Image (tube, grey):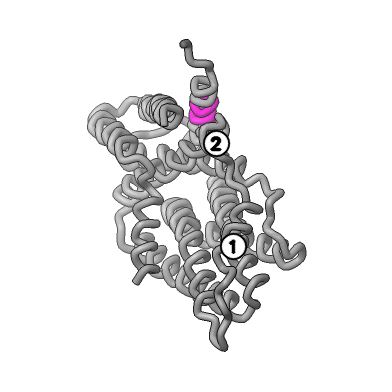
């Protein structure tokens, strides 16, 4: 049973480290879906990558600040 | 050719990192309590992981429409890759301690001390089964995600298996944890690759087209790499008092 529970935790943990970061990433992807499915402009998808990259910088910097405060 | 190389490389590197971690657990159990139980545990875990790859791999490839598959797997790959990248950035910036196989080995050995080994060593069996299965789940996801979506499941399986065999052979020869494998750097690289592939497929699933098709993944990887270096610089910058 503990193996099963650990496996479920592991599966969730594959995609979620920090719930806020996960929600923000999913939000960016959702907005990307809205935009990309309507506007068929070549290269527009790079904006999606830039948004996710900026999110990475902000999320890691925020976690570093939190960790240092503890 | 480029896509196949990328599929093989991502599966190989991802599997190599996780196999090194699984090997540490099996070695710690085997060298402390004897080899029979941990080897059976490892074998049982590998069979379970093989079943997962076969069932889910086939299900995904044959049942899910291509665009839906790209959107779902791409999104999951982005979340998975960003998690690895996030951790790699914090480790590179010195916020989180680097993963150390020697320390992980010592911790496992310490946790096993005091337990007596019976005729059937269930503790050794369970520890190896749990360790290999849980580390292997990440490999299963990487293999199915990069292989299933690109139509190269067999290439991804080959990459994953080759890395696993190479790590097991190295462990058999040195009989110590593979502490010299640059695990943190590998995880950083795999994080960049998987996030890039995930973004590429997720966007295709949303209906976008990429200039130069697969070559765009290289541009995406460069963007994520630059962002991760920027994050490390921002974190390392001294805070004004």
- Give the letter of the chain under mark 2: B
Which residue, given by chain and number where applicable, does mark 1 sit on?
Answer: B110
Q: Does any portion of residue B216 appear in the rendered image?
A: yes
Dot 1, how many residues are within 10 Å of its Cα: few (below 14), some (14-19), or many (20+)? Answer: few
Q: Is residue B157 above or below residue B211?
A: below
Residue range highlighted in magenta: B222-229
Name, please, the residue furthest toward the front: B114
Quadrant of the image for the N terminus of chain A? bottom left
Q: Main secondary structure of the magenta part?
A: helix
Q: Is residue B35 above or below residue B210?
A: below
Is B70 inside the magenta-drawn segment? no
Q: Position of residue B78 (x, y in %)?
A: 40, 41
- Drawn side of residue B100 relative to residue A50, left or right: right
Label of residue B91 in the image:
2
Based on the displayed image, in which of its 4 quarters is residue B24 positioned? bottom right
Q: Tell me whether marks 2 and 1 sit on the same chain.
A: yes
Q: Position of residue B9 (x, y in %)?
A: 59, 49
Look at 60% across and 67% down and name the residue there: B26
Is B225 inside the magenta-drawn segment? yes
Q: Is residue B230 above or below residue B183?
A: above
Q: Does any portion of residue B219 appear in the rendered image?
A: no
């Amino acid at each position: 049973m503990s193996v099963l529970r650990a496996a479920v935790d592991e599966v969730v943990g594959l995609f979620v480290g920090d719930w806020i970061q996960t929600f923000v990433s999913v939000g960016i992807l959702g907005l990307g879906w809205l935009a990309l499915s309507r506007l068929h402009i070549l290269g527009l998808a790079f904006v999606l990558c830039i948004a996710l990259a900026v999110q990475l910088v902000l999320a890691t910097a925020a976690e570093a600040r939190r960790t240092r405060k503890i | 050719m480029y896509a196949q190389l990328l599929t093989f490389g991502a599966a190989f590197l991802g599997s190599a990192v996780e196999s090194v971690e699984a090997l540490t657990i099996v070695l710690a159990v085997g060298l402390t309590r004897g080899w029979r139980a941990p080897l059976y545990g490892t074998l049982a875990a590998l069979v379970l992981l093989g079943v997962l790859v076969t069932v889910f791999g086939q299900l995904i490839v044959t049942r899910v429409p291509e665009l839906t598959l790209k959107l779902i797997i791409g999104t999951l790959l982005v979340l998975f890759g960003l998690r690895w990248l996030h951790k790699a950035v914090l480790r590179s910036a010195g916020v989180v301690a680097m993963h150390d196989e020697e320390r992980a080995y010592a911790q496992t050995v310490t946790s096993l001390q005091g337990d007596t080994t019976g005729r059937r060593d269930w503790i050794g069996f369970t520890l190896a089964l749990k360790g290999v299965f849980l580390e292997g789940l990440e490999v299963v996801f990487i293999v199915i995600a990069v292989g299933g979506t690109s139509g190269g499941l067999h290439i991804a399986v080959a990459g994953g298996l080759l890395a696993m065999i190479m790590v097991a052979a190295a462990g058999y020869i040195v009989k110590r944890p593979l502490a010299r494998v640059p695990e943190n750097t590998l995880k950083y690289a795999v994080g960049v690759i998987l996030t890039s592939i995930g973004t590429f497929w997720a966007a295709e699933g949303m209906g976008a087209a990429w200039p130069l098709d697969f070559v765009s993944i290289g541009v995406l990887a460069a963007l994520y790499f630059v962002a991760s270096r920027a994050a490390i610089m921002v974190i390392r910058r001294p805070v004004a008092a």
